[in-house]
Image (cartoon, rainbow, N blue to C red):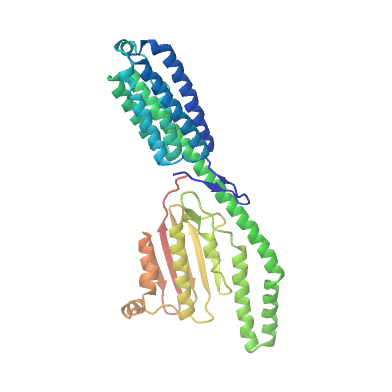
Amino acid sequence: MQQRFTVPGNDRVQDPTTPLWRGTGVLRIVTFLFAVGVTWVNHTGYTRPWLAWVTVTAMGGWTAFTVWAYSQGFGRRPWVVVADVVVTCALMGLSPLILSDTQYAWRTPLITTIWAAEPPVAAGTLAGRYAGMVAGGVVALCTYLSLGRLDVDVLRDAALLMGAGFVVGLAAQVARQSAEQLARALRTEAATAERERLARSIHDGVLQVLARVQRRGAELGGEAAELAALAGEQEMALRALVSAAPAESTVDGEVDLRPELQLLATHRVQVAAPATRVMVAARTATELTAIAREALSNVDKHAGPDARAWVLLEDLGDEVVLSIRDDGPGIPSGRLAVAEAEGRMGVAKSMRGRVVALGGRLDLQTGPGEGTEWEVRVPRAPSRD
């Protein structure tokens, strides 16, 4: 369950919950010293003083092990935390053999006292708020069984143990999420800086050469004009590639849909998108980009070499609308049904199937001489930030 993050440019692996683990170790030491003091004050009244000191010695050994393990990272594993809960409850279970009836009547603390409060904190740090609550509940149950009574004191301890595990677990989750967001931001910043460096280098070299080939080929005509057209297409594609922002993903797995669509721009394809980010699930972004590519592929195949296409992305809040339009001859009535019957499944499977899988809707507007327009409407789950 331990999560680590590496900051770009720094090979040192960092655990965002390390301060909480250090605090857990301090809590264990402080509570152990308190338990030693309580045992010293009450040992003359114990039924078995020797067993009390043996138990305290075992608590000291387990304290040393857990403090070392949690501080070094070795103990930040489920089996160590589970063992911490089990050992704590087992030592607490020796209380009926140590405390006398008089001490029980006077509500003398159990042999572990507040030393038992550490496992819920460790569980919360390791696995989150619910794990902390469960560990707190287990320790509270052991407290009830060791005391043999259910009263306000037991319920109070249960509330404190479960509450401490919940709060520390929530803090650990927030720390991990914040560290992941920071790591993503740093990676995006590094990728953007590298992209800008490459863009400058490409602009000074490859793009200038392609632009010159395009101009010179157009002047020469003939086959050179065809090469000029190809050079122009590659120039536009390369410009789109170096200008598109790198994909940015959130903790919830959402990405900006615009960069992938912007890479589709050529001298025949224009892409229009909002100025602000359009965040959707990563799977949704992948499927919508594939739909756009399939639609543009159909333009290349069926609309002719001179056809132009337009890709429009709209963010309507609760849904995302993607439109792909061309100025080709349009699709004759019944042509899609014939293509599907012939086994050509581009529209039926690649486009319609993807839209249905996303829970969206695919509309087609076309007619002889009217071009073709595909409109994809996909619902977007509300943000969980």
Q: How many numbered circles are shown?
A: 0
Residue at image point 40% right, 33% down: 84
Relative to 255, residue 301 above or below? below
Q: Nearer the viewer, residue 346 or 121?
A: 121
Task: Name the image quarter holding the N terminus.
Answer: top left
Q: Residue furthest right?
A: 204
Query: Is residue 82 toward the left or the right of residue 264 in the image?
Result: left
Q: Residue at x 49, y 23 (%)?
A: 30
Indicate whether 263 appears above or below 234. above
The picture places residue 217, in percent across and down from the top left corner, at: 67, 84
Up the image or down, 332 lies above or below 351; here it is below
Q: Is residue 13 visible?
A: yes
Q: Name the outermost residue toward the bottom.
A: 222
Q: Quadrant of residue 43?
A: top left
Image coordinates of residue 105 in percent, x first then y, are: 31, 11
Query: Residue 156 falls in which quadrant of the image?
Result: top left
Judging depth in this view, the residue of 165 and 227 nearest the camera is 165
Residue 242 placed where, x, y %?
62, 65
- Residue 169 in view of the camera: no
- Whether 190 is drawn above or below 301: the answer is above
Q: Quadrant of residue 54?
A: top left
Residue in the picture at 54% in, 58% down: 247
Q: Position of residue 252 (x, y in %)?
A: 46, 49
Which residue is nearer to you in this view: 168 or 95? 95
Question: In the picture provided, is 81 more to the left or to the right than 47?
Answer: right
At x 58% / y 50%, what residue is drawn?
185
Residue found farthest to the front: 50
